[in-house]
Image (cartoon, rainbow, N blue to C red):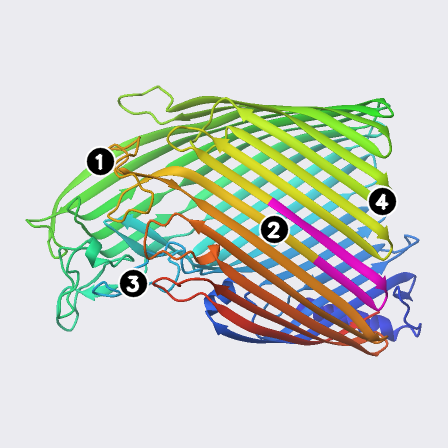
Amino acid sequence: MRLWVVLFMMSAAAMAQTQTPAAADGREMGGFQVEQSVELGYRYVDVTGNKDIYDTFIDQNQGPRVLEQTLSIRSPQHAGALFDDLFLSSFGWGGDPENVARARVSKYKLYDFSALFRRDHNFFNYNLLANPLNPPTSNPNVPVDFSPHSMDIKRRMYDFGLTLLPASRVSVRLGYSRNRSEGPSFTSFHEGTDVLLAQPWNVTQDMYRVGVDLKVLPKTTISYDQFYSLDRTDTDTFLAPFAQYPLTTGANPLMVEFGLPINVAAGQPCNNAVSSTGLANPACNGYFAYSRYLRARTTNPTEQLTFTSNYFKRVNLTGHVSYSSADMNTPYSEFFDGLVTRTRERQFTFGGPASVRRLSTNADIAGSFEVTDGIRITDSFRYDNWRIPGLWDSVETATLAAGTPATLLSGLGTTTSTSETFYNFLGMRTFQNLFQVEYSPVKQFGVNVGYRWRQRRVLEFVPTDEQPQEFDIDRTINEHGPLLTVWMRPMDALRINMEVEATTADNFLTRISPRQRQQVRGRVSYKPGRWGTMSASVNFNESRNGAFDTQYAQHFRNAGFLTTLFPTERFSMDLSYNYSDILQDAYICYNGTFQAPGTIAGACPTFSSSENNNPNWIYSIYENNTHYFSGTVMFKPVPKVTTNIGYGITKTDGNATILNTLQPLGPLQFTYHQPLASVSVEVMKSVNLNAYWNYDQYREAGVAGPTLPRNFHDNRGVLSVRYAF
């Protein structure tokens, strides 16, 4: 708001100094060309249904707003004393979930300064995420009406950049960025049961940049940059109150937390968890306290050298090399007080300092050579190599319950302490190359034939007493395949592009890593005249891995069109449609008393009571298709009145293998309607009165599940006044 006040005062003072009438491209003031706009308004919001889902999707609330603001001051003859160009813009001030402010100031050949501020409010509470789906038949009945992994985080981002002598043979670049995220969030933890944990988010990143550009050779630029970032993670975790019951009676009863899943029939947290008198069963898994303390500090210096050159005739060269070494150090402390019936633990602690280092080197070089006016050869090579060694000096204590049986009311028994140093190493080295030949005999046609090759070597090392020096993973993966691109321009108004690429791998890292991949992309654009444009595109991506125990299959198919028509200044229309089809199927192993249709009981090929205690086998499916359509019509019934009316709809239909009878399909089947309308009236020169209306209706098909329904609808209206010259 302060920024807008300053800008408004600047523009008011400027208007008082001149009587020049307003022009379409601004006003001339003291040798500067000045343009300005500001739109102030008030938003009205009415929401019916699930407000948390509305905030997850939209998060616009009622109140006054600075909807938009711009100020441009330019000196066409570069005659300004301090600056030649000044540009300020912002939107969203007053409470919208996204706020942005930009500033750019430059003086011809001397400096170029830019500043950017962004703020976003990330509210997420889609209540099916991590929900235990407690059955309503359980006694006690404890529904979970929210997502145990919900968040309400505000992020503020600052970016500043200064270039000195931008047009000189030697120019210097300076920069600073800051990213600050904070706010309440929640997560869960499993030990005996799954408990709700409060997680106040507190993460900060600062980055400093300095660079030099050298333009000592014709058509050649060499740049050297140094980056230094400091990341601070101060997000602690502690027990959040949920499903608490008294263990004892009296004025100050001892309370225990049973956790998120309350399904007594399945033994969660145990059978007969609460007595008829309301007392908790002390033989259950339960928590009195839990905390996790973390203070991670990461430094990451990086140096980078790049060059671009067109020095040689018909030859273009670009190159880049960078090296970084990140170091992360953190103390770690974890504490539990309660009962884990499986191990008889009443208390445990984990602690000790941890340190991790990430060393990264990457380089690429690319060049193109024009053999003739119609033939071009290009080649690009890239090298990546990163290594992450880690060390953790851990100290663990475990305190068992005294006496037998072990209950939540048992005293503390014997304590054992264990110290151990954990080493680990993860790394990957990649070589990849793309060679292409482009042939364009005439301006109406061209073809590009290429071949892509990539080799990755992945290493993972976690030493044990049995294997102190052997890699757990040492795998090399070679991928290669051809690509073909064809473009046609049979007439100036019509352009057609088509690209086909196929990739085959001789190995895989995980059983759902694709070994065969095919991709087809196409686009058609047509501009019949100044009154309209039309375009359509397709994108098909198919992936497979024929590992015997997964038979992984995946595809993503997308197609759509966009049409814009503006036959007159008083009428225009935009129409768009998009369709996507997503599939991901694979064999999976699972356990549980419920067996989904198609299950082969006890047939899991990798079943092991010690490593994979999931005996049942089924070919799991995930299928989803989405239709999206939107249309907007602009009409000016009279010269000073502009109206817009539009409609958007998103409809999804899908299916998935369900292993829990209480699990709804949720976002796989929903319809989302979004009509809109607006009217703008020019009441006097440079002043417009505006009214905007938006409506949203989100509705899922099928049952909501054992939690709150996620459907909502809303009306959002804005009344505003806009001043511009």
Identify residue type, mark 1: Thr
The reply to whether residue 590 is in sight is yes
Q: State yes or no: residue 568 in magenta.
A: yes
Of labels 1 and 2, earlier in sequence is: 1
The residue beneath circle 3 is: 242
Of the two numbered discs 3 and 2 on the same chain, state the one appearing first in sequence. 3
Report the side of 150 relative to 543 (left or right).
left
Marks 3/2: CA distance? 42 Å
Report the disc number at residue 418: 1
Residue at image mark 2? 579
Residue 280 at x, y = what percent?
Answer: 16, 63
Q: Is residue 166 left or right of residue 255?
A: right
Q: Say whether residue 1 is visible.
A: no
The residue drawn where x is 61% and y is 51% is 579
Separation (CA) of disc 4 from disc 3: 63 Å
Q: Which mark is residue 262?
A: none
Say which element carries label 4.
Answer: loop
Give residue 169's quadrant in the image: top right
Quadrant of the rendering where the N terminus is positioned: bottom right
The residue that mark 4 highlights is: 109
The magenta stretch is 558-575
